[in-house]
Image: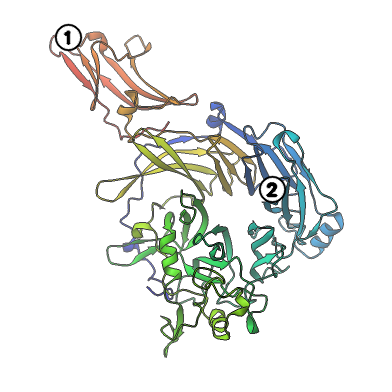
Amino acid sequence: MAPLPAAQAASPSACPPYRQTPRPVKVYVTSHELKATGTAHFFNFLLNSSDYRILLKDEDHDRMYVGSKDYVLSLDLHDINREPLIIHWPASQQRIEECILSGKNSNGECGNFIRLIQPWNRTHLYVCGTGAYNPICAFVNRGRKAQDYIFYLEPDKLESGKGKCSYDPKVDTVSALINEELYAGVYIDFMGTDAAIFRTMGKQTAMRTDQYNSRWLNDPAFVRAQLIPDSSERNDDKLYFFFREKSADAPLSPGVYSRIGRICLNDDGGHCCLVNKWSTFLKARLVCSVPGPDGIETHFDELQDVFIQQTQDTKNPVIYAVFSASGSVFKGSAVCVYSMADIRMVFNGPFAHKEGPNYQWMPYTGKMPYPRPGTCPGGTFTPSMKSTKDYPDEVINFMRSHPLMYHSVYPTHRQPLVVRTNVNYRFTTVAVDQVDAADGRYEVLFLGTDRGTVQKVIVLPRDDMETEELMLEEIEVFKVPAPIKTMTISSKRQQLYVSSAVGVTQRSRRQDIRHGNPIRQCRGYNSNANKNAVEAKDNSDRRKELRVEGRVLRTEQGLLLRALQLADSGLYSCTATENNFKHTVTKVQLRVLSSRAVHAVLVQAESPPGLPG
């Protein structure tokens, strides 16, 4: 499928036939209820700060590093409110005044918004902030081990943040620090017009994408950067960038495309037109769409967040991506899952090329220069070439004019894993956890929304190769609702960390899943962390737990009461308990007309199946 123009715009009749409403087993937990469970901690007591956007988890030091306006924080992973270490790092008063005079403080932007925190070595972090529209970077000493209780800025190691951190705090910066070299997707000018994928620091040559070349980057919004090896040969290693950008062909196509781009880590740049510029940069379109009954796809075009789920094979992680749609036809969000095999197949396929009387996008069919554009020097296919500077002119010229792949990357099974339409919110972030249950391993999705909630979702396989979504709960994680900015999971500590403009929340994320059936849960098919009970309520309004013994038997269909008595009449409740939070899953009213008439009765739930907790 040609990347441009895109699939036709969806019409109301083309709304996806996909299951948009998950099974109704959800529990809605307010921030007040969440606080009452004792399973959550809220950090937001810096009165003069905001925008807690950057989270870096450090399992070795048992710390969570947080970047906000004018502050860098080191929080205890076990309890984020316990003895926080705080660095106050505002912009200078002179710089703030200059920023205000330039007219950039309409929404309080003239502060030092921390936008980059990367581990430098065992003892130091590398941290950058917007510096009141004058980016600045520094090293932070965090000590060698957690017991050191050290956290301070190295005052003699301040340096310019240009090419490392954006000027504008509203513009996200993505980065990866690899072998003491910083790779960043960033806007590098005061006016926010020059976007680049930059490499600074380290021993290699400083490098960037071709400047003001809309074929390479067209007003991008960077989302994620991730190193993913291609093979056992380190010279093949590539850094992948996830971003969205404006279409260069509007109004013939959607206004925004989602992209996955990549570069070789050992790219030294080219010659002629690509001196100190990437000579291996390629990009492809990421498609997240639902096929309609009339063949027209409903697209979610705006990439919002990416989560990389590592596997035993470091070359083949699973990629979860959150998209939104904001067109005039419909609004919604979706989660799509991609495999590295599909991504590599697209990058190994034909290049996009414009030709013909209408200057249309076509697959390039001319002679391919050697080595193939985008190939890393000294790698599996180019062992004799030690540097991209050795590449022939035809390779360099081809790369500059053909950065786009012709085919798009489609999700697994060619459809989203989760879809939401006709709702009053959008997904903003995603984090994925793996939970072991008696019948296998499940992947639990935590989906942050722009209304300040986190949805907890699992997707179960079905016999017909389809999937079924179960939304277990939706939680208000902040007292003051604010869009969720970042989420990260500590599987080691069974914790989920969530940030927004108003603070950071830590919450226990443990929850074991079994078939989504409350009757089975209530019959004791559960983990030690999840105790469930069936209670009987008699006419005197006293509650008691119904013991499974003697005349009460467990069956696949429910609880079997033998030798029924008149006293067995009442309301039977199935209650799930997790971390002191109780929720009634279902209730069954039993009326016994005569103890002689019925010798046994099966108590069976009729409510929708599923168990939160």
Residue type highlighted by circle 2? Gly
Residue sitting at 23 percent across and 27 percent down? 557
Instruction: Specify whether 600 is left or right of 196.
Output: left
* Image quadrant in which you'd find residue 385: bottom right
Instruction: Specify whether 13 is left or right of 260.
Output: left
Q: Residue furthest front?
A: 384
Depth check, front residue: 590 or 275:
275
Q: Residue 351, relative to residue 491: is it above or below?
A: below
**How dense is the environment of label 1, judged by Cα within 10 Å: few (below 14), some, or many (20 and up)?**
some
Residue 398: percent from left, percent from top = 53, 82
Q: Which residue is mark 1?
A: 595
Q: Specify the quadrant that holds the N terminus.
A: bottom left
Residue sitting at 69 percent across and 58 percent down? 180
Q: Specify the quadrant that holds the C terminus.
A: top left
* Image quadrant in which you'd find residue 209: bottom right
**How dense is the environment of label 2, judged by Cα within 10 Å: few (below 14), some, or many (20 and up)?**
many
Residue type highlighted by circle 1? Ser
Q: Which residue is mark 2?
A: 67
Residue sitting at 67 percent across and 79 percent down? 275
Residue sitting at 54 percent across and 36 percent down? 492
* Image quadrant in which you'd find residue 344: bottom left
Residue 549 shows in the view: yes
Dot 2: element: strand
Give the spatial CA distance, label 2 vs label 1: 68 Å
Q: Residue 359, relative to residue 606: is it above or below?
A: below
Dot 1: element: loop
Q: Nearer the viewer, mark 2 or mark 1?
A: 2
Residue 570: percent from left, percent from top = 29, 15
Instruction: Specify whether 252 is left or right of 571.
Output: right
Q: Earlier in the sequence, mark 2 or mark 1?
A: 2
Q: Residue furthest left?
A: 597
